[in-house]
């Protein structure tokens, strides 16, 4: 049984919004063993919606539609679905009460627009939207299920997880697909492919491998579509073979993030962290603090963008900057030691580099970056040469810093 | 003339990668007056690719395909296109030399995988990929154009801008669509719709309005598809009418970002900036430093996550924290003053709040946030109540802080 996803919204077709909903839905469907055959994005247009529904019906047993359920005039999905499934819109008083309550909590009186959001097709099952005024809807036709969800990501996600997904499981009883994603750092796609060529060529034919590169991280995804009972064993055997070749580069699996892994290590070992950033400009701190509960181990950070602030706030010797330059090994090590002491932290990480596009020299071109990790016992540092693109340099430097920090945390007691 | 976009890659269908390429392509096509009718994502699968090409041919005159051109075994787009357009793969020595040069710059010897990337269909025009080994390809069939681009975003973007887009302009000579996007802060979608209802109802029928909400920012997009000559005048008239209603909430247009606008104001006025963050955890500094050239005005920041660091590094009175709590008006104002003085900056912004999911109380629930902006002349502050979701709270707090900072920068000399 295949699923298809249809996202509705002119904003996607003119490129103003990146469709992140589809990735979320596809991930959740795959986890319960439903493959997504196609994702289609179309405009807020009645004919396009109807054509897309007809097309999806040809191949899929489950069709999930997001978007176009808002209170404003450009949102036409609900009326189009009501017509498509030959239903009438009727006022649902339970939904109306919910909308009233929700708006009163926000200190807003219900408007005619909001009231109309409680008018729903009479032949669908309503999927409660606890966080918003646009309800989800479940239609059935010829043994196939159609689910309409709002386009606002957090509302869509909540309805999907709490209502739609359990109903999909119940209706289709899928057998699971198994994926294992191996997260690596330090090898580009071609270099990795060469390094693991003999392992890849000997993979079982029922396992599929994909390379998923992003700045600083290369993910290797193994998928087993058949032999569901054997899948777990097959994947763990392949992984242990792979570990013999690239163990040094592997830092996590599946949905792991470096910032969470670093956080877990800090909590386990009872260590605290502080961060000094120059070229990464707050990115490392921002990644570390994206993790709930990080105040248990994160003391804080300094973004020392000016040379003066490297000296005043982090205690870097001004002579070091004069002699070696701000992007140098002595400076990054001083930054790391300085920020560890200022915050009274056990461990610290520091970056200094030339993010670009300007500021490069022959000796230190754009992308040149020093990273240091400091503990009470030692301070280590490494020079990196990233690329020419500012955003990617910042991203790669932040990832490399967290990777170095993780290695050091594993080593120390 | 309509365009369609096809993105190829299993990683999209299993939800492991968000398709950001389509938004970029759609935006660029729209800017030169080519509407995108549909975006389709399919897997690395020969039959799916062929079906998608056949489908796209029915409605579109231009089809752009991304993905599946890498050196690894899962990449099958090139061979499939060669078969679809009845061509043979032949070794292109110019491309081979380019690949060799590129790899030698990276200190890598050419492998058989990379050499095969220089084998290209004999009936396509090659679109040079200066940044990578996978070339772009331009095919023609029945007066329609098919462009194949690599999936790696920065390679795809460079080929699109330097080769594909000029060739599309030349081949199709489109007449432009005009969009004007108005960026607002401080009103949610429903509240905005009510506030501007009479303006919206009186819009000319050839103008289309869309509401594009995201955390902290609501964009209003006006599009004129017809009367191209009149479009500029029509849009500026509508904008000046709209400004009478919501001028206070408008901060920019089209691709403007708050961090760039703040940067421009700082540079114009010759002021420097420093930032103190608690709940935003480095997000504001990270946004400010994403702008090239920000070292002209950005001195640095402190992320003071612990109470001790708020006192030690920013000079907050420990008694204030005891008496009013870390999330309070006196503390946020001290943080702003402190960070301005420590970095010797002219202007500063500070945040303290409860990002969640834990840490909320009855009096100060999750989402409660104080933001302050400090100059030599004054320190102003404001309390906000955001929501329950950590990531969105951080995002909304950072946007609100930059919005407050922008207002203050406009006021001061």
Image (cartoon, coloured by chain):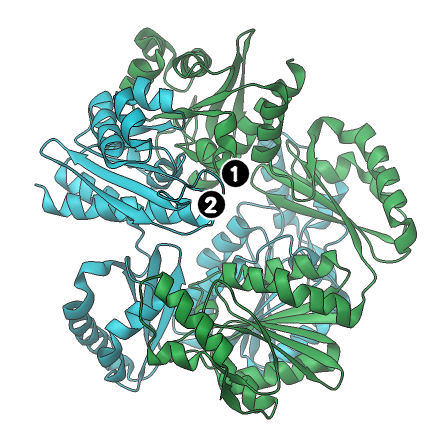
Chain colours: A cyan, B green
Residue A179 is at least partly visible in this image: no
- For residue A390, the mark is 2
**Image spot of residue A128 (x, y percent):** 55, 53
- All told, the count of numbered labels is 2
**Residue depicted at x 27% and y 21%:** A319
Q: Residue furthest front?
A: A362
Which residue occupies the foreground of this view, A389 or A373?
A: A389
B154 to B192, vertically: above or below: below
Q: Is residue B241 left or right of residue A343?
A: right
- Mark 1 residue element: loop
Residue wearing tag 1? B292
Residues at marks 1 and 2 touching, judged by CB atoms closer than 8 Å = yes
Q: Is residue B44 left or right of residue B307?
A: right
Residue drawn where x is 22% and y is 78% of the image: A199
Which chain contains the residue that carries disc 1? B
Tell me where residue A317 appears, x and y as whole percent.
25, 21
Apparent side of residue B278 relative to residue B197 in the rendered image (left or right): left
Identify which residue is drawn at 62% across, 19% down: B269
Label 2: element kind: helix
Discs 1 and 2 carry the same chain letter: no
Q: Quadrant of the C terminus of chain B?
A: top right
Q: Say which quadrant the N terminus of chain B sits in.
A: bottom right
From this view, report whether residue B340 is shown above or below residue B102. Answer: above
Q: Is residue A251 visible?
A: yes
Q: Is residue A276 above or below residue A233?
A: above
């Amino acid at each position: 049984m295949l699923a298809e996803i249809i996202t509705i919204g002119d904003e996607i077709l003119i490129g103003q919004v990146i469709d992140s909903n589809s990735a979320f839905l596809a991930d959740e469907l795959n986890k319960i063993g439903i493959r997504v055959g196609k994702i289609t994005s179309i405009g807020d247009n009645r004919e396009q919606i109807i054509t897309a529904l007809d097309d999806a019906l040809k191949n899929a047993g489950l069709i999930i539609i997001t978007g176009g359920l808002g209170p404003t005039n450009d949102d036409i999905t609900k009326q189009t679905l009501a017509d498509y499934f030959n239903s009438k819109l009727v006022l649902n008083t339970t939904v109306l009460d919910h909308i009233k309550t929700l708006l009163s909590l926000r200190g807003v009186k219900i408007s005619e627009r909001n009231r109309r959001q409680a008018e729903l097709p009479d032949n669908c099952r309503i999927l409660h939207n606890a966080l918003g005024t646009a309800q989800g809807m479940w239609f059935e036709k010829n043994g196939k299920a159609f689910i309409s969800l709002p386009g606002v990501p957090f509302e869509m996600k909540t309805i999907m997880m709490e209502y739609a997904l359990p109903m999909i499981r119940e209706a289709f009883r899928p057998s699971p697909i198994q994926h294992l994603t191996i997260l690596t750092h330090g090898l580009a796609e071609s270099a990795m492919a060469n390094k693991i060529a003999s392992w890849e060529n000997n993979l079982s034919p029922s396992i599929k491998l994909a390379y998923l590169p992003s700045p600083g991280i290369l993910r290797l995804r193994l998928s087993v579509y058949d032999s569901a009972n054997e899948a777990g064993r097959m994947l763990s055997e392949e992984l242990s073979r792979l570990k013999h070749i690239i163990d040094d580069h592997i830092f996590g699996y599946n949905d792991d993030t470096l910032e969470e892994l670093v956080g877990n290590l800090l909590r386990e070992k009872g260590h605290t962290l502080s961060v000094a950033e120059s070229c990464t400009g707050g990115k490392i701190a921002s990644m570390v603090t994206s993790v709930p509960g990080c105040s248990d181990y994160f003391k804080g950070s300094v973004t020392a963008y000016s040379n003066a602030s490297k000296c005043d706030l982090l205690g870097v010797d001004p002579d070091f900057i004069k002699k070696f330059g701000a992007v140098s090994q002595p400076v990054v090590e001083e930054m790391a030691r300085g920020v560890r002491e200022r915050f009274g932290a056990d461990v610290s990480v520091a970056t200094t580099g030339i993010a670009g596009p300007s500021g490069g020299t022959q000796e230190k071109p754009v992308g040149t970056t020093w990273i240091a990790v400091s503990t009470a016992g030692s301070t280590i540092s490494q020079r990196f040469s990233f690329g020419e693109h500012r955003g990617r340099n910042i991203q790669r430097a932040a990832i490399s810093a967290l990777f170095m920090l993780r290695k050091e945390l594993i080593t120390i007691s």
